[in-house]
């Protein structure tokens, strides 16, 4: 069981690193504080169906998998 969790932890961490590096940076920066960001554009409404939206969902899944496997592995050592 410990070996399987360790393998899942290592694979999820490698995939998570790759997914984060594949994502585009948020270029709005401090401009979003002044309200200059478009909230009602076609791109913002359909972002979930795009490649970027898919990357965000997959990244969230592997983040949860990473933290759950880390918590289980830590609890086994205590």
Image (cartoon, grey):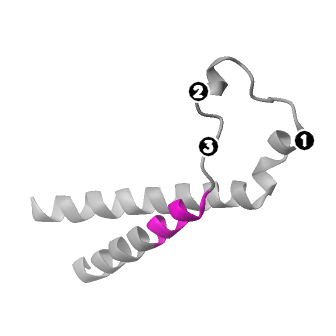
Along the line of sight, the residue nearer the viewer: 17 or 25 = 25
Q: Secondary structure at mark 2?
A: helix
Side of 39 where 52 appears, left or right:
left
- Name the residue beneath numbered marker 2: 30
Q: Secondary structure at mark 1?
A: helix
| Residue at position x 36%, y 58% in the image | 68
Secondary structure beneath disc 3? loop
Counting from the top left corner in percent of width and height, residue 30 is at 58, 26
- Please report the bounds of the magenta region as a residue range: 15-23
Q: Residue furthest left?
A: 78
Measured Cα–Cα span from mark 1 to mark 2: 22 Å
Q: Marks 1 and 3, Cα distance to the nearest angstrom?
A: 18 Å
Which residue lies at the image location 74% right of the left edge and 61% below the top edge?
51
Residue 5 lies in magenta, yes or no? no
Quadrant housing the N terminus: bottom left
In this rendering, the answer to whether 16 lies above or below 67 is below
Left/right of residue 44 with respect to residue 52 in the rendered view: right
Whole-percent x, y for residue 24 in the image: 63, 54
Neighbours of disc 2 within 10 Å: few (<14), some (14-19), many (20+): few
Question: Dots 1 and 3: beta carbons under 8 Å?
Answer: no
Q: Residues within 10 Å of mark 1 (few under 14, many from 20)?
A: few
Q: Which of the labelled discs sits on residue 42, or is there none?
A: 1
- Residue farthest toward the right in the current orientation of the protein: 42
Q: Nearer the viewer, residue 74 or 12?
A: 12
**Along the viewing direction, whichever of 51 and 32 lies nearer the viewer:** 32
Q: Main secondary structure of the magenta part?
A: helix
**Callout 1–callout 2 Cβ contact below 8 Å:** no
Where does the image place residue 60, in percent across and percent down from the top left? Answer: 54, 54
In the picture shown, does residue 27 fall above or below 39? below
Alpha carbon separation for disc pair 3 and 2: 10 Å
Q: In the rendered view, would you say 64 is above or below 41?
A: below
């Amino acid at each position: 069981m410990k070996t399987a969790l360790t393998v899942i932890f290592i694979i999820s961490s490698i995939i998570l690193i790759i997914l984060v590096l594949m994502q585009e940076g948020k270029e709005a920066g401090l401009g979003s504080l002044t309200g200059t960001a478009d909230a009602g554009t076609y791109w913002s409404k359909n972002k979930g169906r795009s490649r970027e939206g898919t990357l965000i969902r997959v990244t969230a899944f592997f983040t949860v998998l990473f933290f759950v496997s880390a918590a289980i592995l830590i609890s086994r050592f205590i």
